[in-house]
Image (cartoon, rainbow, N blue to C red):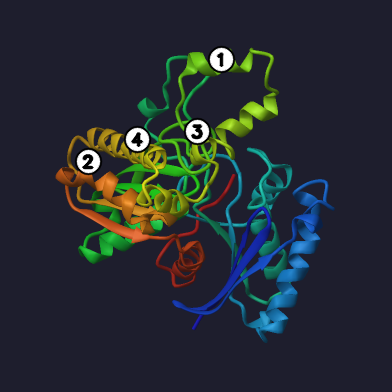
């Protein structure tokens, strides 16, 4: 039996889990008050604090860390890499520390994982499928200006996990089928999966694809330029309009799709229109992925937190059901996905990749 510790740092919380093979024996979200996080002047400076609360929680739960075989951290903003499991090495730690693609709490996942594993005999530290996974076809990178190529930033961990789960249900290898996966969360990503590679996907973080509860998605470029040079908004304010204060937040004042759906069901016509527009854009992106795959699609998957939302899902399906079989995997179990990636390496079923 293998015992695996999973660490998933977020902006104001740190999720941890312990798995014994496929079985979860501990799952905990350690919440950090905003006042406490304000004491730190950078993501990197939170390192010792977060590691300490993790160790304290494991001790409280009577988990003997010396029995841990692997520690899997949430992959951070490293250089664009292929999907897979990467053993933490010096190059990875360097890029997580300096934030080579930006600073985010998830950068701490691999660092803390390595630190904990380093004091346990025989333990290994991994990251798996970070948001910067990049398997785009070259043609998918091109935009109308060479200074602004498309980038791959999306929900790689959950997209890959549900794609493999679906493949197992139809008794096929993920690497032998084509799928369209739409992750519906605070951000929305729609990926075209071609024979095990996500060859096209929107940048779900900072400006491409459907708008979402918190993100503006694709907006008219001319309007954006005019807004930037209007003198009315700072760089930070415009950035916030795109990520954090866009989408449902901008239109309805909430980032909770279930709240917007409740308003719509109670007769709020504006809320219903905005949700319809979001669903409409998701459906168009799914249609675009269908074209990328030349119509050879073995399944369409809707996943993420909003996949629980019957109103939104129904609106999307109204447009896409004719394209093929639609399967719903509501929610996102990042902790299980990270643990299974580590377990597959320990069992020798997956070969670890080297970060350079």
Circle 4 residues within 10 Å: few <14, some 14–19, many ≥20: some
Instruction: Name the residue at 24% across, 47% down.
Output: 317
Residue 71 left/right relative to 190: right
Give the distance between the C-alpha atoms of the residues marked 1 and 3, in whole angstroms: 15 Å
Residue receiving disc 4:
281
| Upstream in sequence: badge 1 or badge 3 | 3
Vertical arrangement, residue 35 with respect to residue 212, above or below? below
| Upstream in sequence: badge 4 or badge 2 | 4
Residue receiving disc 3:
216
Circle 1 residues within 10 Å: few <14, some 14–19, many ≥20: few
Instruction: Name the residue at 64% across, 13% down.
Output: 230
Instruction: Name the residue at 75% across, 49% down.
Output: 43
Give the distance between the C-alpha atoms of the residues marked 3 and 2, in whole angstroms: 21 Å
| Upstream in sequence: badge 3 or badge 4 | 3
Vertical arrangement, residue 105 with respect to residue 48, above or below? above
Residue receiving disc 1:
225
- Residue 26 screen position, x and y as percent: 57, 78
Give the distance between the C-alpha atoms of the residues marked 4 and 2, in whole angstroms: 10 Å
Residue receiving disc 2:
319
Give the distance between the C-alpha atoms of the residues marked 4 and 1, in whole angstroms: 22 Å
């Amino acid at each position: 039996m293998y015992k695996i510790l999973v660490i998933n740092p977020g902006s104001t919380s740190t999720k941890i889990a312990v798995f014994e093979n496929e079985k979860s024996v501990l799952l905990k979200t350690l919440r950090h008050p905003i006042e406490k996080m304000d004491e730190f002047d950078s993501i990197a400076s939170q390192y010792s604090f977060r590691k300490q609360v993790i160790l304290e929680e494991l001790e409280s739960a009577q988990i003997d860390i010396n029995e841990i075989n692997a520690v899997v951290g949430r992959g951070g903003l490293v250089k664009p890499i292929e999907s897979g499991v990467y053993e933490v090495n010096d190059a990875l730690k360097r890029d997580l520390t300096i934030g080579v693609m930006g600073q985010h709490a998830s950068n701490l996942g691999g660092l803390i994982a390595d630190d904990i594993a380093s004091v346990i005999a025989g333990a290994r530290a991994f990251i798996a499928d970070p948001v910067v996974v990049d398997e785009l076809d070259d043609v998918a990178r091109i935009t109308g200006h060479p200074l602004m190529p498309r980038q791959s930033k999306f929900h790689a961990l959950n997209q890959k996990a549900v794609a493999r789960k679906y493949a197992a249900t139809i008794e096929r290898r993920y690497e032998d089928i084509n799928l369209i996966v739409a992750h519906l969360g605070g951000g929305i990503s729609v990926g075209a999966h071609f024979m095990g590679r996500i060859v096209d996907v929107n940048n779900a973080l900072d400006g491409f694809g459907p708008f979402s509860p918190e993100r503006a998605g694709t907006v008219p470029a001319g309007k954006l330029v005019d807004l930037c040079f209007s003198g009315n908004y700072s760089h930070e304010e415009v950035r916030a309009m795109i990520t954090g204060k866009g989408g449902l937040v901008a239109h309805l004042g909430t980032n909770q799709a279930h709240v917007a759906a409740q308003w719509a069901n109670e007769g709020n016509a504006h809320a219903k229109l905005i949700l319809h527009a979001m669903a409409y854009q998701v459906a168009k992106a799914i249609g675009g992925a269908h074209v990328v795959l030349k119509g050879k699609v073995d399944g369409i998957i809707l996943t993420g937190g909003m996949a629980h939302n019957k109103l939104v899902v129904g609106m999307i399906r109204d447009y896409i059901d004719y394209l093929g079989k639609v399967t719903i995997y509501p929610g996102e179990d990042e902790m299980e996905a990270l643990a299974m990636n580590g377990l597959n390496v320990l069992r020798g079923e997956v070969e670890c990749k080297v970060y350079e």
